[in-house]
Amino acid sequence: MDSSLILAHALGLMDFFPVDPPPPNPPPAPTGTPAGDDSSVSATPSPFAIGGTATPTPITGAPPDLVILSMKIDLQSGPGCYNPPAAMGVRVAVANLGAGEAGHFAVWVEGVLQPVDGLAAGETASLWFTGYEQNDTTTAVVDYSDEVPEGDEGNNTREERLPVPTPPVTCTPTPVRTSTPPPGRWS
């Protein structure tokens, strides 16, 4: 990984850099852990985990389960009125459906990564990604770098064709009153 990407990741700017699509097959189990038995390890977040390898550390209790709940094309500002030239993009809802807490992980949507500091059991988060491909499928991957050992690693990807919504009504600017003195009173 070149030094500019390392610096951008350390500064939390990775959502501005394109990232390769997710691999077609899940990665192998961490070294030293029997395949299929990942209930006793978790990933220690590393500022360089994207494109690298997370360091396994022991955990206790039930594992987390990160999923993409929904995806939709939406205004960056969210619902409400439309202020041209408002940006349209993909809004992704992610959740931790497991019983354990999920530490730091990243969400990938069509080549762009956004970090998430973590989700408690049952917690959700909404992320907005700039741009979208009209008339094409959109793919999102939660825990892109496999930093969080989960109860179900097979439900981290969602792919669907997203309809482009009709934009809401254009916002009406609020008139601003100005005080104008009556004629002849101010000289």
Image (cartoon, grey):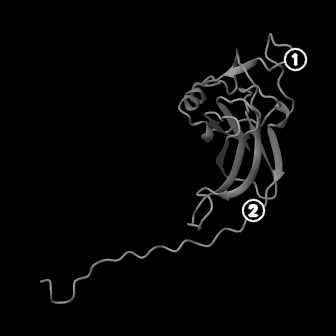
Which label's residue is closer to the chain start, 1 or 2? 1
Looking at the picture, how far across and down is residue 165, in whole percent?
A: 73, 65
Q: Are marks 1 and 2 in contact (CB under 8 Å)?
A: no
Q: Which of the two marks, 1 or 2, is nearer to us in this view? A: 1
In-image side of 27 versus 119 (left or right):
right
**Disc 1 residue type (three-letter):** Ala
Q: Nearer the viewer, residue 65 or 100?
A: 100
The residue pinned by badge 1 equals: 35
Q: How many other residues sit within 10 Å of disc 1, few (<14), some (14-19) or many (≥20)?
A: few
Q: Nearer the viewer, residue 138 or 6?
A: 138
Quadrant in which the N terminus is drawn: top right
- Camera sees residue 53: no
**Disc 2 residue type (three-letter):** Val
Dot 1 lies on which element?
A: loop
Image height check: is 47 above or below 88? above
Dot 2 lies on which element?
A: loop
| Cα gap from disc 1 to disc 2, whole angstroms | 42 Å
Looking at the picture, how far across and down is residue 130, in whole percent?
A: 64, 50
Q: Residue furthest top?
A: 32
- Camera sees residue 50: yes
In the picture, residue 177 is in which quadrant?
A: bottom left
Which residue appears at 60% of the width and 65% of the height? 80
Q: Nearer the viewer, residue 2 or 90?
A: 90
Which residue appears at 59% of the width and 30% of the height? 9
Which residue appears at 80% of the width and 37% of the height? 156
In the picture, residue 167 is in which quadrant?
A: bottom right
The residue pinned by badge 2 equals: 164
Looking at the picture, how far across and down is residue 43, in whole percent?
A: 70, 21
